Image: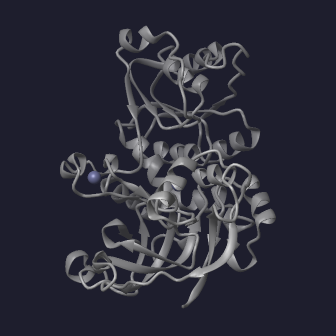
């Protein structure tokens, strides 16, 4: 059987609790075989070119997130090994018998993929609300991922990509960029005062997108000096450093942040706050700085309970709170394509120059990948990309 390089977690080799990182090893290349699994008729085999390393992969690396989903899915499959990774660009090298007639894909096409594989039959899917499917699986978590030279995927999840319009390293991170597009799609940002709380990778994308969508002012709320600098470079009009909440009240908003936001918005507050840090205090900062009738988009995640400070404020100020997950299929992908392919808005170039640092130190070939040096890379750059093929 043919083998390939992959980055894996294997519970027969390392325990979830007492290990970190991923292991580079040879694993069997997946095959399309309709005689074994008739569903392969609607699947394709993809040769991976580039794969993005996500914040959730960081959570897996340090065993802080997704343990229950990975271990639970391995239980139900009766296996021990999971190939991680869910952001990619690749080339179709084989297709099932129904792929051509049903989905129109051919061998040789360049595609990215939606990472949430939806069931297509649940209540939400039947209503076209695929991003909140009741039975979705996430590649690289609850099924095999793309940190590998090849991946088998259902044709329905793919997204065609034109490499004459998007460079491959950027095309590989359309999925996380799409997360930020989805958050910015919730409400109209044209002419709006927008705050981005937390300018990690998705927050940095959101700064670019909000500007590209015509926001009037974009205010970043970010404590880390390096990320503040990146946000400024990407067009953030103002940056506010949030203070630490009191130790006995870690959920508390910083009143000074609200004061500074009011000063920047004619005493009104922002129209839209995009919460992308996932901290309880940040969520409360978002609610405190949003004008009456404004929108608070909640995107950052942290498990467990949270305190809603001045809960009455939400009602009395007529705030609208939105939870945002994944991407709308495929409206968000279509908007993502539009934003990245339009060279006039400068978004693609800014991602390449600033977030991907023109590929310097951020693009890691699988041939030279090793755990220690990759860990250094992922702690230095917001968005490392692993190259599996040119
Ligand atoms: Zn991701
Ligand atoms: Zn469904």
Q: Quadrant of the C terminus?
A: bottom right
Q: Which residue is drawn at 71% across and 32% down?
A: 223
Q: Residue at x 42, y 8 (%)?
A: 312
Residue 252, position as x, y percentages in the image: 62, 16
Residue 80, position as x, y percentages in the image: 57, 65
The residue nearer to you, when weighing 346 against 120, is 120
> Residue furthest toward the bottom?
1
Quadrant of residue 5 in the image? bottom right
Residue 143, position as x, y percentages in the image: 46, 63
Q: Which residue is drawn at 46% across and 77% down?
A: 164
The residue nearer to you, when weighing 174 against 22, is 22
Quadrant of residue 372 in the image? bottom right
Quadrant of residue 334 in the image? bottom left
Question: Is 239 on the left or on the right of 166, as rendered?
Answer: right
Q: In which quarter of the image is the N terminus?
A: bottom right
The residue nearer to you, when weighing 145 against 103, is 145
Residue 66 showing in the rendered view: no
Is 234 rendered above or below residue 330? above
Is 251 rendered above or below residue 296? above
Question: Is 346 on the left or on the right of 295, as rendered?
Answer: right
Q: Which residue is drawn at 51% across and 58% down?
A: 141
Residue 135 showing in the rendered view: yes
Question: Is 332 on the left or on the right of 124, as rendered?
Answer: right
The residue nearer to you, when weighing 123 against 375, is 123
């Amino acid at each position: 059987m043919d083998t390939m390089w992959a980055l894996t977690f294997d519970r027969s080799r390392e325990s979830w609790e007492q290990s970190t990182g991923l292991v580079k090893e040879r694993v069997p290349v997946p095959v399309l075989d309709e005689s074994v699994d008739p569903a392969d008729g609607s699947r394709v085999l993809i040769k991976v070119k580039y794969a993005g390393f996500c914040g959730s992969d960081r959570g897996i690396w340090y065993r802080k997130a997704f343990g229950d989903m990975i271990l639970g899915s391995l239980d139900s499959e009766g296996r021990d090994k999971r190939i991680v990774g869910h952001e990619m660009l690749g080339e179709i090298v084989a297709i099932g018998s129904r792929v051509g007639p049903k989905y129109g894909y051919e061998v040789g096409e360049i595609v990215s993929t939606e990472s949430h594989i939806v069931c297509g039959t649940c209540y939400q899917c039947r209503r076209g609300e695929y991003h909140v499917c009741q039975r979705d699986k996430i590649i690289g978590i609850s099924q095999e991922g793309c940190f590998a030279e090849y991946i088998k995927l259902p044709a329905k999840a793919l997204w065609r990509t034109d490499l004459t319009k998007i460079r491959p390293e950027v095309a590989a991170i359309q999925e996380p960029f799409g997360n930020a597009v989805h958050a910015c799609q919730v409400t109209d940002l044209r002419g709006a005062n927008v705050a981005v709380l937390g300018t990690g990778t998705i927050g940095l994308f959101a700064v670019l997108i909000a500007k590209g969508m015509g926001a009037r002012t974009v205010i970043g709320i970010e404590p880390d000096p390096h990320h503040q600098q990146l946000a400024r470079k990407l067009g953030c009009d103002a940056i506010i450093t949030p203070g630490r909440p009191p130790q006995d009240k870690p959920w508390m908003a910083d009143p000074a942040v609200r004061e500074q936001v009011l000063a920047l918005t004619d005493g009104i507050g922002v129209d839209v706050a995009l919460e992308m840090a996932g901290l309880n205090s940040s969520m409360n900062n978002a609610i405190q700085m949003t004008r009456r009738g404004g929108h608070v988009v909640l995107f950052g995640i942290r498990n467990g309970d949270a305190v809603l400070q001045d809960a009455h404020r939400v009602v009395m100020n007529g705030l609208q709170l939105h939870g945002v997950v994944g991407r709308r299929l495929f409206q968000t992908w279509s908007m993502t394509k539009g934003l990245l392919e339009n060279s006039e808005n400068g978004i693609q170039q800014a991602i390449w120059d600033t977030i991907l640092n023109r590929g310097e130190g951020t693009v890691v070939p699988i041939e030279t990948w090793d755990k220690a040096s990759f860990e250094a890379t992922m702690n230095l750059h917001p968005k490392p990309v692993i190259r599996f093929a040119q």
